[in-house]
Amino acid sequence: MRVTEDITHSFFRGTGSLHPWEGVTDPIDPEEGRKQGKYTWAKSPRYDVPGKGYVPLEVGPLARQVMANRPGAEAHQDYDPFVADMIAKAGVNVMTRVLARMHEEAKYFTYAKKWLSEIDLHDDFYTKPAEPRSGKGFGSTEAARGALSDWIVIEDGRSPTTR
């Protein structure tokens, strides 16, 4: 899935969307930004949905459970009937989002205990990575509000957008 970052409403110079590797983070004074209708430091991801173009999508525990409950979902998607029942009875709202977060935290606590018990403290635990002078990279993880990704471009040992 292709993604862009929209800066129209964030305290950065410009408007519109670019792929994260092509974007420029050029901050402006928040007071100036407010005069332009901007209200946040966050860039807003947009996902390429066939037939709809680049649109914002919900992410996080509730969205994961909606996807895990669909026909043809993969086993690794961790379907949970509790969340599906909440959505069926109460709909998608703030309460179901918060309950899905709380329920997922408890479930993953159990997984984390299992994973920690599998660590062999006598094994190697760190391998220093190569440090190329140029390249592109990204990392994704989950935050309480949903997916979080960081993108970077390095040219000649530094980010080309660094001023």
Image (cartoon, rainbow, N blue to C red):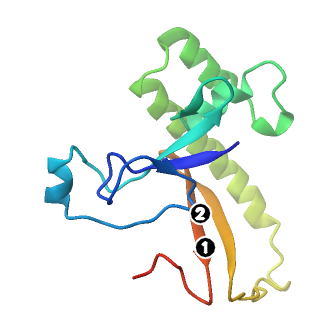
Disc 1 residue type (three-letter): Val
Depth order, front residue of 24/103: 24
| Residue at the (42%, 46%) spot, across then down | 16
| Residue at the (70%, 42%) spot, across then down | 1
Which residue is tagged 2?
A: 21
- Residue 50 is left or right of residue 55, and the answer is right
Q: Quadrant of residue 12?
A: bottom left
Depth order, front residue of 155/119: 155
> Quick check: can you spot residue 4?
yes
> Quick check: can you spot residue 60?
no
- Residue 144 is left or right of residue 32, and the answer is right
Proximity of marks 1 and 2: CB atoms separated by less than 8 Å: yes
- Tell me the quadrant of the picture where the C terminus can be found: bottom left
| Residue at the (48%, 48%) spot, across then down | 17
| Depicted 52 relative to depicted 61: above or below | above
Disc 2 residue type (three-letter): Trp
- Residue 86 is left or right of residue 76, and the answer is left
| Depicted 87 relative to depicted 3: above or below | above
Neighbor class of circle 2 (other Cα within 10 Å; few <14, some 14-19, many 20+) is some
| Depicted 132 relative to depicted 71: above or below | below
Which residue is tagged 1?
A: 153
Name the spot of residue 26 as percent of width and height, x first: 36, 67
Name the spot of residue 75 as percent of width and height, x first: 85, 34
Name the spot of residue 46 as percent of width and height, x first: 53, 41
Depth order, front residue of 84/160: 160
Q: Quadrant of residue 130?
A: bottom right
Q: Disc 1 or 2, which lies upstream in sequence?
A: 2
Q: CA distance from mark 1 to mark 2?
A: 6 Å
